[in-house]
Amino acid sequence: MNYCRNLGFTEDPDYNYLRRMFKELYNRCCFENDFIFDCTIYRYHAQINQESFGIEMGLRKQKKNSSDKSSDPNSP
């Protein structure tokens, strides 16, 4: 933050330096990249919530599982 605050208005930041600092911090904190991002999780939960809300309001029909089809005597 000090580096960024000390930049002049017209100065370009040293992006390589900033990337290196974040990578070193990431490694020091022993984080592991699982390729699951917050935006992906949020989008997935939003989709689940929309589907369940639609079912509750009678706007959508509940999807049948493949196990439900095999137990239904009327299914082909």
Image: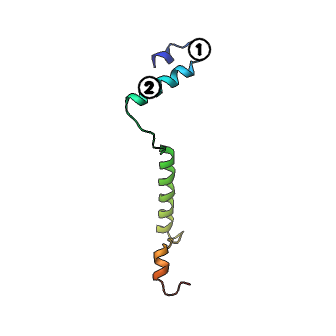
SS for callout 2: helix
Hey, which quadrant is residue 14 in on the image? top right
The one of 9 and 21 positioned closer to us in this rendering: 21
Q: Looking at the image, which residue sits at the far bottom?
A: 73
Q: Residue at x 52, y 72 (%)?
A: 61
Residue 59 vs 39, above or below: the answer is below
In the picture of the structure, the residue carrying the numbered disc 2 is 24
Q: Residue at x 47, y 28 (%)?
A: 23
Residue 37 vs 3, above or below: the answer is below
The one of 51 and 36 positioned closer to us in this rendering: 36
Residue 10 x/y as whole percent: 62, 14
Residue 12 x/y as whole percent: 60, 17
- State the mark number for residue 9: 1
Between disc 2 and disc 1, whose residue precedes? 1
Q: Residues within 10 Å of mark 1 (few under 14, many from 20)?
A: few
Can you say which quadrant of the picture contains the C terminus? bottom right
